[in-house]
Amino acid sequence: MCGLLLCLLLLIPAAQADEQGVLANLPACHDLGFSTEEDFVIENGTQVVSDGDLLSRSGAVCARNFELLTPWQVKEDLGLDAVDIVIADMKPGLVAFSTELDDPRGRFGAGDLLATNGTAIPNSVLLQKFKIGYDMGLDGLQFIGSVQGIIGFLTATANISEAQWLADPGMLFEGLDKFKVDIWISTESTQYTSDTMQILDGDVLSVGTGAIVVQQANLLPLNVPAGLPVRGVDFGADALTANRNGDIHTLRFSTEILYRGNTAAAPFTDGDVLKMGNNGIETPNSSLIILFGPKARFLGLDALHINFADPDLDHDYLPSISTD
């Protein structure tokens, strides 16, 4: 198994090579990585952290936005809207992600699935099985399958151009089948007129099957008015992570909007890490960012990755850090 992983790592294109320290600090995000919705200055005032940087709960910057975008040599900060850290502890590291902004030179859009090895899959191709022919954005991202399979898939797709994807979207599903992986996503917009189903930006979708994995109404407790049209509000799914086996009970997420709560349901913010269903808040946003020492106690949560495969991480893998 280890031999196979090493061979696959060697096949990852050199565009993301660690020659100049690119992704050198990625191991700091081995167990958890996230991005905030706002830029901020760390406690000593000597470093600005952007909403495009990949951060660790230990107070480390795991990767700057330009490091993630090394294959495209983008110097502008384009934000970090979704993330899945495939390899953190071996070189070269491998991260799948999406940005908040389009590439200034038009090579990819904010809704495309990117990876640090140069993969760029257009958003409309990801949504092919939902029969939606336009970009709906990409807010949450989680690869399902073995790490070896995910590496194989991303290696095989690294040199496919946008034009090739658009000319033959079926390549995506051939690759997913070949490497036995799926991609769970959430979108930034809502589609009420799809040929197949209504899609909310708070639904969790399966790219490979064209099915809704979890509807918005089932992500949040019954006493929260989540879901359209019955309960009244689409809270969104702004960050998304789960284990590689696709176990629904491991799903963790954040919302697009906060909920002030009532006598029946506890409040939460759009920066808190939430469990699915009636389990509520697992970790408040302040616990994620406290070790950075920002001037604010809340910075939002745009992207989230958790390594459920680590044997040291059980269901209480993300303890709250006291903010008192």
Image: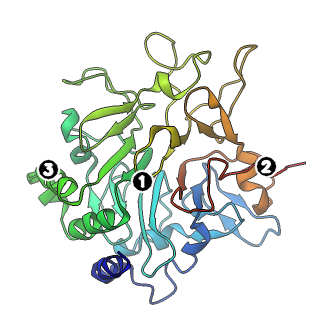
* First in residue order: circle 3 vs circle 1: 3
Number of other residues with Cα within 10 Å of mark 2, as a class: few under 14, some 14 to 19, many 20 or more: few
Residue 149's place in the image compared with 278, above or below, is below
The residue drawn where x is 61% and y is 26% is 278
| Amino acid type for the residue under numbered disc 2 | Ala
Which dot marks residue 169?
Answer: 3
| Residue assigned mark 2 | 296
Closer to the eye: label 3 or 1: 1
Distance between the alpha carbons at the discs numbered 2 and 1: 34 Å
User: Which marked residue is nearer to the observer: mark 2 or mark 1?
Assistant: 1
Specify the label residue 244 is tagged with.
Answer: 1
Q: Residue at x 66, y 25 (%)?
A: 259
Q: Is residue 116 left or right of residue 321?
A: left
Q: Residue 305: x, y in percent?
A: 53, 55
- Between residues 27 and 74, which one lies in front from this camera angle? 27
Task: Give how far across and how far down residue 88 sits, in percent.
Answer: 50, 71
Say above or below: 126 vs 309: above
The percent position of residue 316, horizontal first and vertical second, equals 67, 48
Mark sitting earlier along the chain (2/1): 1
Image quadrant for the N terminus?
bottom left
